[in-house]
Image (cartoon, rainbow, N blue to C red):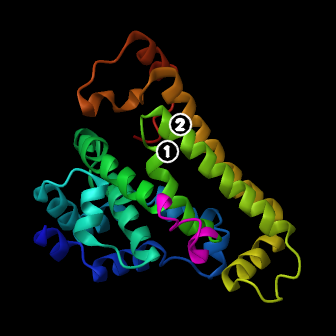
Amino acid sequence: MASVKEAVTPALLAELRAFWFGHFESQDAYALPGQKDLMPWFMGGKALDDICIERYAPALEAIQASGITSGKDLVEALEPATPLDWLSLVLLLDQVPRNCYRGASSRLVYSVFDPIALGVATAAIDRGIVDQTPEIRWFCARRMWFYLPLMHSEDMATHERAMAAYQGMVDDVEALIASERVDEGGCEHKSRAAKVLQRDPEAARSMVKLNFDLEKKHYDIVRQFGRYPHRNGPLGRETTAEEQKYLDEGGETFTS
């Protein structure tokens, strides 16, 4: 356990967070990330992979070497101190492995890190870190990462929970757009987010709809197949005829 604490330090979590959001040109992007804000995360290519491998793969290797296999045990070992440290930990477990391990080695993403990430994200949600922390709840560019481990699960009950979580984010955005007297007292973070969303409500609605619709795509695949067919190769699973037909006809692989 000590080696994990030495590798996954508060300083590392803070540095990861600074890097992950470092391309934002404005604080407004935390409330309403636009296409240019999303692109570095999801279309970062080899440049992003190389940075993640150089800076954060040692922490992932330390987690593997520790023998920790559950989010609960990792949370107990690391004791994240702040809501933003929880966010960084989710990023480290759910996103960074997808940049460090590709191709055949993506089995480590699905079999090792995804289960731990799901446990950490679920613990954060259960503890109210998402809904009761204003700087998380009202800023979609932070909040959305807590739900991706649920989206990545192959468990149907987890997807039911994910659908509800994304709907909650949609509802909160609508509430911010409709809110009045945003300058009069109340929560500073909520007021700031409301001002940003009210400047471009259609962009705000489009952003959360994109998130909800992406979860619905994942939900439908797991409902149909009980798993993600595109993971069969790295995980050594036999692909059924139905799954092969789906993949051959252009079924979703989410860039694997």
> Which residues are the magenta region?
125-137
Residue at mark 2:
218
Place of residue 7 in the rendered image (x, y in percent of width and height, measured from the top left): 18, 73
Q: Which mark is residue 52?
A: none
Report the quarter where the N terminus lies.
Answer: bottom left
Callout 2: few (<14), some (14-19), or many (20+) C-alpha neighbours within 10 Å? many
* Rendered image quadrant of residue 172: bottom right
**Residue found at x 65% / y 43%:** 213
**Residue found at x 22% / y 50%:** 69
Q: Nearer the viewer, residue 134 or 7?
A: 134
Mark 1 to mark 2 CA distance (whole Å): 7 Å
* Rendered image quadrant of residue 121: bottom left
Callout 1: few (<14), some (14-19), or many (20+) C-alpha neighbours within 10 Å? many
Location of residue 42 with respect to 151 vertically, above or below: below
**Residue found at x 56% / y 77%:** 24
Q: Tell me which amino acid carries mark 1.
A: Met
Question: Residue 135: within the magenta?
Answer: yes
Residue at mark 1:
151
